[in-house]
Amino acid sequence: MYAQMVQSTGKDVKTTAEMTPQEAAFQARIDAGEKIEPKDWMPPAYRKTLIRQIGQHAHSEIVGQLPEGNWITRAPTLERKAILLAKVQDEAGHGLYLYCAAETLGVSRDDLTEMLLDGRMKYSSIFNYPTLNWSDIGAVGWLVDGAAIINQVPLQRTSFGPYARAMVRVCKEESFHARQGFDAIRKMAEGTPAQKKMAQDSVNRLWFPALMMFGPPDKDSVHSEQSMAWRIKMNTNDELRQKFVDQTVPQIEFLGLDLPDPGTKWNEERGHYDYTDPDWSEFFDVIKGNGPCNVDRLAARNKAWDDGKWVRDGLLAHARKKAAAKVAAE
Amino acid sequence: MKNEWPLWEVFIRGQHGMSHRHVGSLHAPDAKMAIKNARDVYTRRNEGQSIWVVESNHIAASSPSDKGPLYEPSESKVYRHPTFFDIPDDIGAM
């Protein structure tokens, strides 16, 4: 979800008979619930898929700062501003934990950054939608981070040790994000009629993009099977999406807002809410780069990277000069 | 020369008189900045009272393939654990 449509081998999962002894031993460790650590042997495709997945996850955290950063200077109170600032700072930290996990697989941080900046690597589709007003900030924290939690909690048990440990840290901080979002939109929903209307509008606009975060429906999800065998994906896209719908519908009702999808109905037989699928053609279009904000997001990341170059180079030059002087003095 | 900041491993002492524990890593141009960054990234919620940083390439690590020779010998030495010995109940705590 923060990593959507991560390309895996694209082939059927090998049977034990088709595996080399090394591959079979590796799969047996995963099936036994053992963690794989960076220096352990792993199939090249496991490594490659994980770099894509963790990298995409990290990029999503970093790009995800942009729609919210947009409202830091315009938060309605000093308290809301301090909270939002802390939340956006957390996202930078989440990106960092994840980049570090990816680096243990042998890819460099700058390489990952460059692959984001030139479009070779993706980030979550959700961050290509705009935050038009303060109410959207509440809705993003509540819905987007709420969806992120549903995805990330199971990933704490993922097979790759550094990824699992990063997820533990992330999850600890993520519930603060969802709660502050809910608190912000609740204030709007319980406010004046105009404020309530804004809250409704935010939920209406962000509902389907939030559902898209979990990726395409299972029937179209070609890479899931191998990733699930490797335990780098713990649940199917539709399972997680259903969980999100079931959890969120009562929250929308609590807020006294209308359900954004008239197709939402409790299904007694299934024990779940039925819901309307998002428009998947829109999803694929946003992934391809044609969402409302794709161009702005990448331009902002590129500008930050280019503008920061003199600082990165300057600090490194200073560190090298100091180190050389120390050697000379010894 | 590639201008990527080196990688540092970060160790934090929590609040309860524990030893420093590895919490993750980060990039920084030098030790001073590594500590500053570690403070920002790993201690935002009272997680620490003390920070150690060490450049990652200074860490020597055992290899996973040495697991056998390194750790198997201790498996057969059960007498190193106090539970190996049968102490009569009458003796009391020991």
Image (tube, coloured by chain):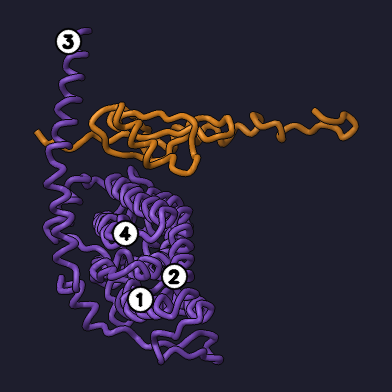
Q: Element type at marker 1?
A: helix
Q: Chain of mark 3?
A: A
Label 3's element? Answer: helix
Dot 4: element: helix
Q: Position of residue A14 (x, y in %)?
A: 31, 68
Q: Amino acid at mark 1?
A: Ser
A25 over B52 or under it: above or below: below
User: Which residue occupies the extreme left position in the image?
Assistant: B1
In front: label 4 or label 2: 4
Mark 4 or mark 1, which is nearer the start of the sequence? 4
Q: Nearer the viewer, residue A317 or A138?
A: A138
Q: Nearer the viewer, residue A228 or B30?
A: B30
Q: Which residue is mark 4?
A: A74
- Chain drawn in orange: B
> Where the C terminus of chain A falls, by quadrant?
top left
Question: Dot 2, how many residues are within 10 Å of its Cα: few (below 14), some (14-19), or many (20+)?
Answer: many
Amino acid carrying label 4: it is Arg
| Residue at horizontal 29 percent and vertical 57 percent from the top | A69
C-alpha distance separating marks 2 and 1:
9 Å
Q: Residues within 10 Å of mark 4 (few under 14, many from 20)?
A: few
Q: Position of residue A189 (x, y in %)?
A: 46, 75
Determine whether A224 is above or below B92 in the image. Answer: below
Label disc, if present, on residue A202 of the rendered structure: 1
- How many discs mark residues in the rendered view? 4
Q: Are marks 3 and 4 on the same chain?
A: yes
Discs 3/4, front: 4
Question: Of callouts 4 and 2, which one flags the residue occurring earlier in the amino acid sequence?
Answer: 4
